[in-house]
Image: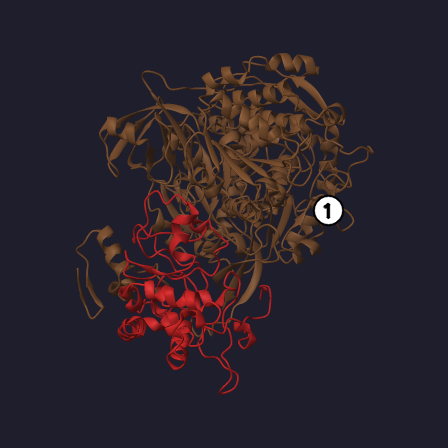
Amino acid sequence: MMEKKGSEKWAKAVPGLFALSFLGLLLVAGREARAVDNLDNFDHQGKKLYMAGEATPEIYLSADAGDRNLASFYELRQYPGSPPRIPHPVDQAFSGKETDCLSCHAKGGYSPEFGKFAPVTPHPENSLCYQCHVPLKEEKPFVASDWQSIDPPRLGLSFLSSSPPTIPHSLQLRENCIACHTGPGAVAEIRVAHASRGNCRQCHVPVVQTDELREFQRN
Amino acid sequence: MTIKGGKEVTITIDRRRFIQSAAAGSAIAAAGAIFPGISFAAWPKVVGNTGVVSWQKTPCRFCGTGCGLLVGVADGRAVAVKGDPNCSVNKGLCCMKGYHSVQALYGTDRITTAKIRKNGEMVEVPIKEALDLVAAKLTETRDKHGKDSVAIYGSGQWTIPDGYVASKLFKGCLSTNNVEANARLCMASAVTGFMTTFGIDEPMGCYEDIDHANVFITWGNNMAEMHPVLFSRMLANRKRRTNVKIIDFATRLTRTSQAADTSLLFRPQTDLAVANAICHEIIANDWVNWNFVNEHVSFHKGKTNIGYGTEDHFAFTDQDEAINFEEYKKFLADYTPERVEKISGVPAKDIKYLAALYGDPSLKVTSFWCMGMNQHTRGTWINNLVYNIHLLVGKISTPGNSPFSLTGQPSACGTVREVGTLTHGLPHGVVMNEHDRQMAAEIWEVPVENIDPKPTYHTVEMFRALDRGDIKFIWIQVTNPMVTMPNLKRYREGALKEDRFIVVSDVYPTPTTDVADVILPSAFWIEKEGMFGNSERRTQHFAEIVKPPGEAMSDTWQIIEVARRLGFEKQFPWSQDNYIEKIWEEYRRFHAGPKHEMAPYQVLRARAGVQWPFVNGRETRWRFNPEYDPACTNGKSFDFYGKKDNRAWIWARPYEPAAESPDGEYPFWLNTGRVIEHWHTGSLTRRIPVLNNAVPSGYVEMHPEDAAELGVVNGEKVKIISRRGEIVIPVQINGRGVPPRHMVFVAFFDESYLINEVTLDAFCPISKQPDYKKCAVRLEKA
């Protein structure tokens, strides 16, 4: 019974499976080996993962931050790499108990309030979130600005036709690749298909295009 | 609101609903169209740029923390920021102001040409013409009204060369001590605190103390908002180790209170009594570190009932008298925790708890403070009293044991304190000292008689003199006194009087440029070369990274241009190619020697910052400790070489009430300060779209019960009335800060709510720093 119920649920929740691709792999393997007949046959954390999947309500599995794409990602920034502003309402007090932000953004997960998955911070060790991230109260500028920035880094910059793409951005405060590149909260275009391979920099090398350091010279 | 295909949006909804629906999903893609100018997608991009930037180092332009930034430059424009991982101050992390700081270069109302007042109208003129007029008017005023009728008023945002040439011109060449800086309003009490206790200015510790301490006590200091990078370093320390506590000791609840382990509220001004009660407890429990006290401490008392300086020509000179420990102990007898509980509202058990933290020999304790203790009519005293605590238990000048006075401006230490751009100061020492005058005259190549041995006006008195007409010409650079002076109305009316001539150098229009007769366009921050000096004795160099717009010129060069027009080519001989280097090497001569040696120019250029004393290629992290400080020579475990007796001084300083306290007629305390998004008067941060849009306007924080009694709800307006003036401002209840009952708090960044028309120009008689944290007001529903 358990297996049947489980299968139906997974079938309905195909988009959500991305989030649980690791679990998904286990399940595929499980069908052949029928490990689910005896959950103890699972390797390592398999049973725990399976049970967690079972305990997850369906809506959580089918929800997806599908509207988080690169365009909306950059909407919140002033230049590529700037701390994004906070796109949702925050309490007026916003008084920085670290659990306020990190309860959702440390590990991600489904937020019933917003009906989607929360993006995960790549630097949970910094818990004074409002130090860098500001909410939006009004859109009217004090005076107009002549600010210009640069185009964000291009995607898919591989050196050979089939080689793994390079990392086009600085890793400062963004050393934890999987925070942004995996899971249902991730931006669609930069989500990886092989999240289970944790050692990202085994294949992907940072190639940040940076000009040489030079100081302004008077003509 | 209708959304068609996620693109077309008609806004007929209120803000809150919009944000909610945007957050809920489909409207996000269209957000760029609704928020023109604040979303990245809506900004134009540097044309033809391939994403390639060059990264160049600079200290941040804002507070006194001195974070190292790397500014990304593409095609001659600053386009991005990241924290400099090589800078030990912030190790690659900034705050929202640092990350968005470069946007402050690009407000569309930048002042790019000079303007002079002709028939009441400001008209654009070539900058040469404006500088001619400044020089002519300065000479004319001086000839007609005497050498002390002209003045320069600068800033802790002056670069070190800015302040240096200002002092050289006015003190060395024009023979007037009418040189002041807005740092008088922000850290004069810190200076007099250091001078009276240690005989030498600036903290003995450094930010590394944060990594070593077990207990942090913030004295009236909302660090979470005002020094966020240091505060998050504290939080990281607490997370990493098991035995770290943060105690917030404050007059209102803030974000710092929220993050602290314990928050203790005291009544305004009673920090004096609590500090004495802590010392009382330390002695009563015999937690005194006698080895330290016997070797390194002497006891003193000064005058009492010292006044508040609210009247013109107020003068005060303290007189110290040596006392012994028994006399000091007797003085403290009035300050039992139980008695102080009645004055301060802090429960006796909490005072004992604080004393136990300071007294426990196994705990390393760092105290932090900034404006709460400095903007205080007994600012010098409260600085002394916190040093007393650390000295009694010997917790000083060792890693993690640190009484730490923070600064609020990027170069309050570097320019104002080290260059001495205050009426009594010189780059080394004070004008009253003959040896110091001789040194200055020799380096400046001016006759020693040029340097007047008598100080003239401190900042408040300088603006009073302008109002009275004793000063007729004032040149204001890099600061906005027509927002920041307490009792503002008097000083604005004074500046507007008929025969006053006001020159203002700035980058944006402000209420101060509104009163100007000449506006000089200044190069901003990284549009020129310079140095700042941060709170931990660190000097930080930045190169000219982008070109200044229009005719904008560095403040240093403006002064040099005027000096040359006045005939001082000999003193100001430098070429525009390398004047900063030449000025630095000249200035360095003042600080030669192990107590204050500054790093050579080339070293500053190469590094993200260098701490002085910089001796034999080594920075000094902890002063007075021979393990780290090469100036220690007495062979003991500490050498407090600032004082002639080689000791740090414990001062018996009593509790005295504030200049103005709430009464039946004016029943509320008014407290003023900042918010994290905005810096000082907001003339820069309000031009940073993302910061302005987070906190777009000023407000008054009220306790919810006070608001209920007055019958106002969030967003409704109240009138704040004092004996000096009144403003009408919206209320915020249960926001990020919550004052106790019968106190209101207003941030001063918004020039449309000039709270300083309400504040009182009372100051500490020793430091002459005004108290912006305490005056009495009443409220009306507006």
User: On the image, which quarter does residue A57 sit in?
Assistant: bottom left
Counting from the top left corner in percent of width and height, residue B700 is at 33, 35
Q: Is residue A205 left or right of residue A133?
A: right
Q: Which chain is red?
A: A
Tell me: residue B775, above or below residue A96: above
Nearer to me, B561 or A3: A3
Q: Is residue B709 left or right of residue B87?
A: left
- Which residue is outermost to the right? B635
Is residue B146 among what the camera can see? Answer: no
Q: Colour of chain B?
A: brown
Counting from the top left corner in percent of width and height, residue B222 is at 47, 38
Tell me: residue B176, above or below residue B303: below
Is residue A213 among what the camera can see? Answer: yes
Q: Residue at x 46, y 41 (%)?
A: B259
The chain identifier of the residue carrying mark 1 reads B
Q: Is residue B246 left or right of residue B204?
A: left
User: On the image, which quarter does residue A83 sit in?
Assistant: bottom left
Nearer to me, A13 or B411: A13
How many callouts does the rendering have? 1
Q: State the colouring used for the structure image.
A: by chain
Counting from the top left corner in percent of width and height, residue A167 is at 51, 73
Residue carrying label 1: B614
Nearer to me, B116 or B168: B168
Q: Residue at x 40, y 46 (%)?
A: B509
Q: Residue at x 44, y 21 (%)?
A: B345
Give the amino acid type for the residue marked by disc 1 in the picture: Phe
Q: Residues within 10 Å of mark 1 (few under 14, many from 20)?
A: many
- Which residue is outermost to the bottom? A161
